Structures are given as structure tokens and as C-alpha cells.
């Protein structure tokens, strides 16, 4: 699909659909099982057995592990294709490095090789992208969030269109301590400078769940989409990788040491950022999946600050806990649960997939996708 066809799709009248994908390491498999369920139900709803999510969603954005999933979907892969490749990726890259382990716990070579094999030399401006794509990274020297979008009229598309998707995904997945930061050439046509930017994981900050940032990309005047807000005009589906329930057994004791503080602070920051995003999104939207933020605010439905909701918002991200794993007949002893909490343990592939599949069947409903957003599939 060339830029002209993408531009026609972006500017066509009618409602628009956005898919936002969280970070979460190997837990991306949980999100993929939810996406498989969404793809299956959309195929049934549209009577189209070959429908792909790129046919339905007009803009797909992701952070960290979600950036890889977003790329695959925007290129037209089915969810089954992605799951197969994702499993291979997880087993290949999460191997502890023995040399220069002070730089990062895992060597980036395996990740970079697989990204090259999987994405080749495709770029952000590549004609093979079937729909809108947005990848979130954080620039290390400035601390700013960079939103790489493939809209031909984006302010920095001329600078960014030649950047390889493999480099963007590698940068977006450069979680501190896990992989080294990633550098690549960025140009600035305004100042006629050619420079190298160094980037880290987009999950460092408020883009772990990129929903709110994607809404800004889709509607604010600083970006080229400028889609019309409204509950019948804009659908945003956000898919997370699951979140662990608070468990005294895992949380209390580590705080009694400096190492405990060091290991828990990032978790707290990511949790707070996710809660903030969820609060704002439920506050400004009509949402059939809204849940209580806390015992004071409730689910915020009816608290919309504007006269009408700005969008129809759907959020899927299962609670991960001992009870849930027991329901899928997974061992729930303390040692096993501790291992399942790891974002980088490839041995978690099968239990995470099973968990995602089981709860996706319970949570995902076509009742969450109003008829206003039904798409005519050619």
C-alpha cells in the first residue's frame, strides 16, 4: 500500500479505529491471545474469514514489546503468524550475557538478528505497511518521547520515513538493564543537521500504556490525522499484557534492603503511569470495560469533563494472580509464581499463552465494538 493509499485511508470520512499495545516483555503473549480472540470475533462479525487486524484498525501503535506486535499487524500479518514468530523471538533473545554483564543483563545481538530477519530493510515509509503505525521510544539525551508515525504529512515524516522498522523496534524494546540503548541516524530538515539519536524503551514513563498518547496523535492539531472525536466517531481498543495483583508475600520483604528498593521502584513508577493513563482514558470516554480506579473515584463513567465523551474506549488487560493460574491448572507454589512474574523468562511462554487464551475468551465481546465501527471489507 503506497503513501497515496494510506493517505486516502487516513482522510476518508467516517469513524476511525485505533489499537494501542502495551509493553511487558515476554508477557506480550498474553496480549497476543487477546488479539487472536479479537481477530476471530471480527472475522465472524464481518463474514470475512481472512480479515486481518490491519483491515479493521486505521492506526496501530505500541511501546516496547507492543511495538513489535504493532509492526507485524501493520504489515498485514495474522495474529497466528505473530504468535509463532514471537515465541521464536522470546526463546532466542532472553539469554543472559556472560561478558560485559555490567552493560546489560542480555545481549542485544540475538534480538537485532531476528529483527533483521523478520522485518528486513522495511522502513517507516515502506509501501508494505497496510495501515497507520506509531512506535514510541524515549530519547535518552533529552528524555522526550518520540512518536514515529507513518502518516505522509507528519511534521517529521521526511526525517523519519527512511528509518528501518528493525531499528525503531530495537530502540523501543531497549529496557534499562535488559538491553543497551540503541542509536541510529536522525536527520533534522529544519536545521539541516544529521545526527545520531540514542533511544531507550518507550515504557520508561507514561507510554508503557500508549493509549492516551495515541489519542493525542490521532486528534491534536500538532499531528496530521486530526480525526473527529466523539463516542460514535473514534474507537480506541487498548490491549495490555496483564498486571499482577498486589501480594504481600512478594512485595513486603524486599523493601527492607537497598536492592529491594532498587528492584521495586521501577515497578511502582510503571504501575503509577498505567493507572494515570487508565484514569484519564475512562474519565473522557464511554467505556463498556470501565472498572473502578479506586474506592473513591469508582469507574468515572458519567464524570466526563466535556458535554459528550471524546471516544469509545475498550481496555483489555487481565489481572495476573494465584487464583487465575490455578484456574488454568498451573502450579501456584511461591517459587513458580515468582518465576512467572519475570518479563524475560522464556520458559513462561506456554503458561502465559494459556492464561491469555483462557481469559480472552471470557473478557472479549463483540458487544464492546459498536455497530458504528463496523467496517466494510473489500
Image: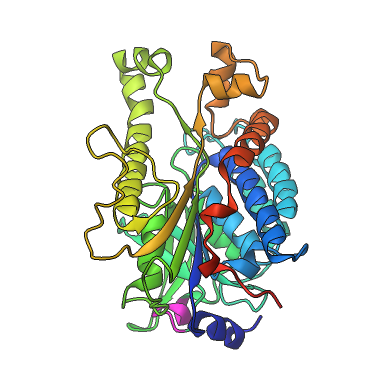
Choose between 175 and 309: the one closer to the eye. 309
Q: Which residues are the magenta region?
A: 153-159
Question: Measuring 49% from the left and 72% from the top, which residue is drawn there?
Answer: 16
> In this picture, is 269 found above or below 55?
above
Can you give x and y, in whole percent of width and height, for residue 343 in the image? 54, 34
Q: Quadrant of the C terminus?
A: bottom right
Which color scheme did the rendering employ for the protein? rainbow
Name which quarter of the figure residue 51 lies in. Answer: bottom right
Can you give x and y, in whole percent of width and height, for residue 68 in the image? 59, 55
Whether residue 192 can be seen here: yes
Choose between 17 and 276: the one closer to the eye. 17
Question: Measuring 66% from the left and 80% from the top, which residue is drawn there?
Answer: 1
User: Is residue 156 within the magenta segment?
Assistant: yes
**As drawn, is 130 to the left or to the right of 316?**
right
User: Is residue 65 within the magenta segment?
Assistant: no
Whether residue 109 can be seen here: no
Amino acid at each position: 500500500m503506497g503513501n497515496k493509499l494510506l493517505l486516502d485511508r487516513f482522510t476518508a470520512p467516517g469513524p476511525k479505529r485505533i489499537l494501542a499495545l502495551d509493553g511487558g516483555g515476554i508477557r506480550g503473549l498474553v496480549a497476543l491471545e487477546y488479539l487472536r480472540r479479537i481477530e476471530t470475533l471480527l472475522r465472524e462479525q464481518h463474514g470475512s474469514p481472512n480479515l486481518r487486524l490491519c483491515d479493521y484498525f486505521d492506526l496501530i501503535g505500541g511501546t516496547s514489546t507492543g511495538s513489535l506486535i504493532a509492526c507485524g499487524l501493520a504489515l498485514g500479518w495474522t495474529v497466528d503468524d505473530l504468535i509463532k514468530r514471537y515465541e521464536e523471538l522470546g526463546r532466542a533473545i532472553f539469554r543472559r550475557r556472560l561478558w560485559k554483564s555490567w552493560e546489560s543483563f542480555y545481549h542485544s545481538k540475538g534480538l537485532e538478528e531476528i529483527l533483521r530477519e523478520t522485518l528486513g530493510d522495511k522502513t517507516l515509509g515502506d509501501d508494505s505497511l497496510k495501515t497507520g503505525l506509531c512506535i514510541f521510544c524515549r530519547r535518552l539525551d533529552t528524555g522526550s518521547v518520540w512518536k514515529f508515525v507513518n502518516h505522509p504529512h507528519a511534521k517529521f515524516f521526511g526525517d523519519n520515513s527512511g528509518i528501518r522498522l528493525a531499528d525503531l523496534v530495537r530502540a523501543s524494546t531497549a529496557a534499562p538493564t535488559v538491553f543497551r540503548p540503541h542509536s541510529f541516524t536522525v536527520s533534522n530538515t529544519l536545521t539541516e543537521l544529521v545526527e545520531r539519536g540514542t533511544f531507550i524503551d518507550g515504557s520508561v514513563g507514561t507510554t508503557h500504556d500508549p493509549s492516551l498518547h495515541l489519542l493525542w496523535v490521532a486528534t491534536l492539531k500538532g499531528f496530521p490525522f486530526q480525526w473527529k472525536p466523539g463516542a460514535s466517531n473514534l474507537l480506541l481498543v487498548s490491549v495490555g499484557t496483564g498486571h499482577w495483583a498486589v501480594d504481600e508475600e512478594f512485595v513486603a520483604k524486599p523493601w527492607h534492603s537497598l536492592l529491594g528498593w532498587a528492584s521495586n521502584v521501577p515497578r511502582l513508577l510503571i504501575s503509577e503511569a498505567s493507572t494515570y493513563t487508565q484514569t484519564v482514558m475512562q474519565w473522557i470516554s464511554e467505556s463498556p470495560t470501565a472498572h473502578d480506579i479506586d474506592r473513591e473515584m469508582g469507574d468515572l463513567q458519567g464524570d466526563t469533563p466535556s458535554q459528550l465523551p471524546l471516544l469509545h474506549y475498550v481496555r483489555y488487560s487481565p489481572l495476573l494472580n494465584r487464583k487465575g493460574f490455578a484456574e488454568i491448572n498451573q502450579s501456584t507454589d511461591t517459587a513458580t509464581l515468582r518465576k512467572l512474574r519475570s518479563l524475560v523468562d522464556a520458559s513462561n511462554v506456554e503458561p502465559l499463552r494459556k492464561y491469555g487464551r483462557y481469559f480472552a475468551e471470557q473478557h472479549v465481546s463483540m458487544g464492546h465494538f459498536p455497530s458504528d465501527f463496523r467496517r466494510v471489507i473489500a
